[in-house]
Each structure stands twice: as C-alpha cells, then as structure tokens.
Image: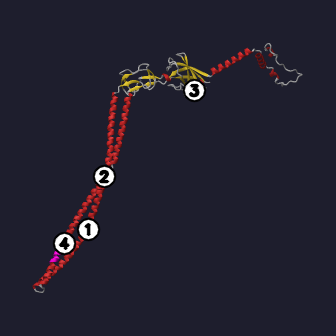
Amino acid sequence: MSSSSSTPPGSPPPASTPPASQPSAVPAAAAPQASSPATAAFVSWRQWLQNLSPAVKGAFIVLLILILVVLYYFSGRVTTDDAQVDAHITAIAPQVPGYAVQLFINDNTPVQEGDLLVQVDPRTYQAEVDQAKANLDFAEAQANSAKLQIGLTRQTTTHGTNGAAAQKNSDAADYASSQAQLEQSATANLQVAESNVVAKKATNDRAQSDLQRYTPLLSTDDVSKFQYDAVDATARVAKSELEAAQQQLSAAQQSVTIARANTQSSQARLSRSESQFMQTKAQEQQVPIAEATYASALATVERAKAALQQAELNLAYTHITAPITGQVTQKSVDLGQYVSPGQLLCTIVPLDKVYITANFKETQMDHVAPGQRARIHVDTYGKDFEGTVDSIAGATGSQQALLPPQNATGNFIKVIQRIPVKIFVKPDKDSRFVLRPGMNVEATIYTH
C-alpha cells in the first residue's frame, strides 16, 4: 500500500482492512476512504507530534501564538505616507483704507489673541466719529422739539375748538332770539299797530263827517254851540288818535326793520362762528402731522445713531489686532504703506491647533472610523506622535479638485482614489518638537 511507504520510522503500521472471515463494521463504500493518502498523512503527523519532546511542543505553541499576535497586529491597522501637517491659517487684512503709521509685528513673530498688529492712521475716522456725534445731538434736539410740539398743538387745537364751539352755540342762541324778536315785531306789534291805525282812521273819518255836518247847522242855529263844540272836540281827538296810531305803526315798522337787521347780523355771526369752528376742527389734523414729524425725527435719530456706530466701527478697524494666537508669516506690510480693504498684510499660523490630513486609499477605509487611535511619524524629527481620528472627508480628493475628473467622457481608467482623514495630534511635552503646516508625516490608524 502506498501509504505505508511514507510512514515515518517508529510510527505504528497503518490500520489494515479486517479479514474476510471477520464481519466488517464499515460499509463497503467507506473502506477505500479510510485508507486514502490524506487520512494516512494526518495519522502520521499526529503520531509525529506525539513523539516530540515537551520542550519542543512548548516552543512550537509559543511560536504559533507569536505568529497569530503579529498577524492580528498588522492586520488591524492602515498606513499611508500621503499625509501632512495642516492648520486653519488666518489671513489678516484691513477693513478700512489708510496709511500704516505703526507696526507691532515682524516676520515669524509670535502673537497672542488680541495683540495689536498694525495701526492705520485714525485721524480721518476720528473726525467722522465727531461729526456723527454732532449729527446725533442735532437729531435728538429736533426729536425733543417735535415731541414738545405735539403737546402744544394738541392743547392749542383743543382749546380753540372748545372756544369756537362755545361761540357757535352763543351765536346760534342770539340768532334764535333775533328771529323770535323779528317774528314778534312782524306779527304781533306790527299787526296791532296796523289794526289800531285802521280803527283810529274809521273813528276819525266819522268824527270829521260829524263835524262837517254840524258846521253849517251852527250858522242856522239848528244846533247849539255846546253840541258843536262837543263834536269839534271829538273830531280833534279822533284826528289826534289817528296820528298817534300812525306814529305807532311807523315805530312798529321800524322795529321790524331793526329786528330783521339784527336777525341778519346774528345769522352772519353764526356763520362766522361756524366757520371758525370748522377751521379749529381742521386744525386738529395738525396733531397727527406733529406726531408724524416726531416719528420722522425719531427715525433721523436712529439713522444718526447707525452712522455713529459705523464711524466708531471704522475707527476701531484702524486697530488691526490678532484674532487668534499663533505665529506671524507672510508679512507684506511696511511702515507708511497705504493699505486697502482686503489687502493681505500677513497670516497667522496657530501652531497649537495643528492637525493631520492623511489621504488613505479607498480600499483602506473599510474599518476606519472617528475616535480610533492613530500614530503619526514625523519625518522632520524622526519621532512618533499620538493622535485620534476626528473625521472623514465627505468626498475624495480628486472630486474636490479645481478640475474634477469626468468619467463620462469615455477616457475612463480605474484609479484607486484617496479620501482625506482628519487626525488630531496630541501635543508633545517637549517644546522643541513643533509641528508646522506642510510637514510630511506618515499616519497609521489602528482599526482594532
């Protein structure tokens, strides 16, 4: 049998098939499998291991454990040398134009947050602040005057309206009284006087007729002197009474004329008072006009305040300070230079807030997650730094390029893309080891 030739020395002979006279416990189909080369080799290796000494067995087990540990260690991490130190570099630029009259920085100068970097000539902006303050004072004075004018206008129009209303009521009463007097003179007195004249005229006519009849009878002695005198006296009395009645009628007529004139005068005064009342009512509209003027003055005050705030801001912008702590680089401003808004004066690099941007292949990103431990090997110092994965970019580096690739053009070649990973670095206790943006590093992330 071929399996017997490969058995190591000292190993027991392989099991043979049972004699034909002995009943077999294995089916006929399984007998060839029991005597296969694989089964024979397994039995041989087991026999060989059993024959090894205990020391060799222990060393073999230790070696196997070490191999498993090394495989676990190297399979639970990803590494890339496409990594560099990064930072959020702040560019310093003025917000107002002017001449740089003082410089407090130089190349590579360390600065603290709030330190004064450059002083722009503030005299023009100080004058604008003073002018804005004067405009604000003037606007506030106008607003106060407009506010007082509201109360004065309201009181004046209210008193004027009340006085005009009282005068209108008085003139209306006078007009009603004059009308009553006119009606009385025209109806009662005049009619009585006219009736009295008619009655006195009839009496006088009869008395004069009697006198004319008695006059010729006196010459013929048909009537006595006594009778004639009585008739003559009656005629004279009747004539006098008629004249008196006529005088009363004339007086009554004059009274009607006077009453009519008084009525017309009262009506004119009433019309004038009504006009004055309407005028004072119309003047009440000056109150909302005054209120609108006051609101406009308040708006002018707010506009003046905004102008003052803008002027104060412009004055504050002449003091260019450091927004963060770091080191000055790219200084491009000199003393006496005219600077414009947006012009780059320098940049500030926050050396205490640097991080690592590591570009891993997309095939390495399967198990990478935020919070994992990382090791950063810095080429400059030949030293390792500890770090932590902060976040993973939302797109590959090529997709964020200025001209991203267009795979739909037909010139597609499959290239493994790289995904940026942001890693925070723990600062080293030794101040000599400073990480500066742009330095090349090698990043390793432990995914287990």
Q: Dot 4, crowdedness within 10 Å: few (<14), some or many (≥20)? A: some
**Residue under the point 86% across and 21% down:** 18
Q: Dot 3, crowdedness within 10 Å: few (<14), some or many (≥20)? A: some
Residue where numbered disc 2 is placed:
159
> Contact, CB < 8 Å: mark 2 with mark 1?
no
**Residue under the point 34% across and 32% down:** 129
Q: Quadrant of residue 313?
A: top left
Q: CA distance from mark 4 to mark 1?
A: 19 Å
Task: Please identify, in this view, whether the residue under mark 4 or under mark 1 is nearer the observer.
Answer: 1
Q: CA distance from mark 2 to mark 4?
A: 53 Å
Q: Dot 1, crowdedness within 10 Å: few (<14), some or many (≥20)? A: some
Residue where numbered disc 3 is placed:
371
Which of 139 and 2 lies nearest the eye of the viewer?
Answer: 139
Q: Earlier in the sequence, mark 3 or mark 4?
A: 4
Establish if 133 lies above or below 230.
above
Give the extent of the magenta segment.
236-248
> Contact, CB < 8 Å: mark 1 with mark 3?
no
Q: CA distance from mark 3 to mark 4?
A: 132 Å
Task: Please identify, in this view, whether the residue under mark 2 or under mark 1 is nearer the observer.
Answer: 2
Residue where numbered disc 4 is placed:
246
Label of residue 184 in the image: 1
Which of 184 and 33 lies nearest the eye of the viewer?
Answer: 184
Q: Earlier in the sequence, mark 2 or mark 3?
A: 2
